[in-house]
Image: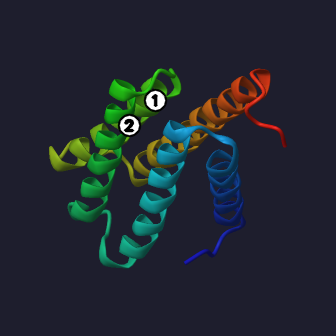
Amino acid sequence: MFSFMSEYVGMTIMLAIGLFALAKGGRPERIGAATMLFAWFLSILTQNYIGYAGVQWPMFVIDLVVLGVFVALVWKSPRSWPVWASALQLLTVASHVMVFMKMKPTVSAFYTVLNMTAYGIMIAIAVGAFLAWQERRAVGQDTE
């Protein structure tokens, strides 16, 4: 499952930001963080059943659902971070579509896009959680 040091670093970043957003973020940040953590967990489970040569249907479905959640957050949330998360998730979905359309990006390019967009989404969630936390502190709702 995790065989390289970079995978442990990525796992640590994903968990740290996800737990921070779950602990200190508002409702949209908690939904976004829970969605990303759940999608990350599901993608780890599906790794053994997919390969790059074929169509990665389980990953495509997971990424479409995550995109749907972020678009719903854009629609319902007063914050701006879901716009960035949706845009980055759309890049992930577009990468899958490129493979489906036989455009054949290199394996390293495909996975680089998937990983970098996930980091970008987690940064957007972390910024949103931090700002929501600071807004609550400014009005005295967060006394910790």
The Cα–Cα distance between marks 1 and 2, rounded to whole angstroms, is 6 Å
**Front-lying residue, 135 or 5:** 135
Q: Quadrant of the C terminus?
A: top right
Kind of residue at badge 2:
Phe
Residue at image location 53% in from the left, 48% down from the top: 33
Vertical placement of residue 102 versus 123, above or below:
below
**Front-lying residue, 72 or 58:** 72
Side (left or right) of 64 relative to 133: left
Helix, strand or loop status at disc 2? helix
Residue 77 in view (yes/no):
yes
- Residue 120, position as x, y percentages in the image: 56, 36
Residue at image location 40% in from the left, 48% down from the top: 110
Residue 5 found in image quarter: bottom right
Helix, strand or loop status at disc 1? helix
Q: Which residue is mark 2?
A: 70
**Front-lying residue, 25 or 17:** 25
Q: Mark 2 or mark 1, which is nearer the start of the sequence?
A: 2
- Residue 19, position as x, y percentages in the image: 67, 55
Residue at image location 31% in from the left, 56% down from the top: 62
Side (left or right) of 136 relative to 105: right
Q: Which residue is mark 1?
A: 82
Residue at image location 39% in from the left, 33% down from the top: 73
Identity of the residue furthest to the left in this view: 101
Kind of residue at badge 1:
Pro
Q: Quadrant of the N terminus?
A: bottom right
Residue 53 in view (yes/no):
no
Query: CB of mark 1 within 8 Å of CB of mark 2?
Result: yes
Side (left or right) of 94 relative to 29: left
- Residue 42, position as x, y percentages in the image: 40, 67
Vertical placement of residue 144 versus 50, above or below:
above
Tag of residue 20: none
Vertical placement of residue 142 versus 140, above or below:
below
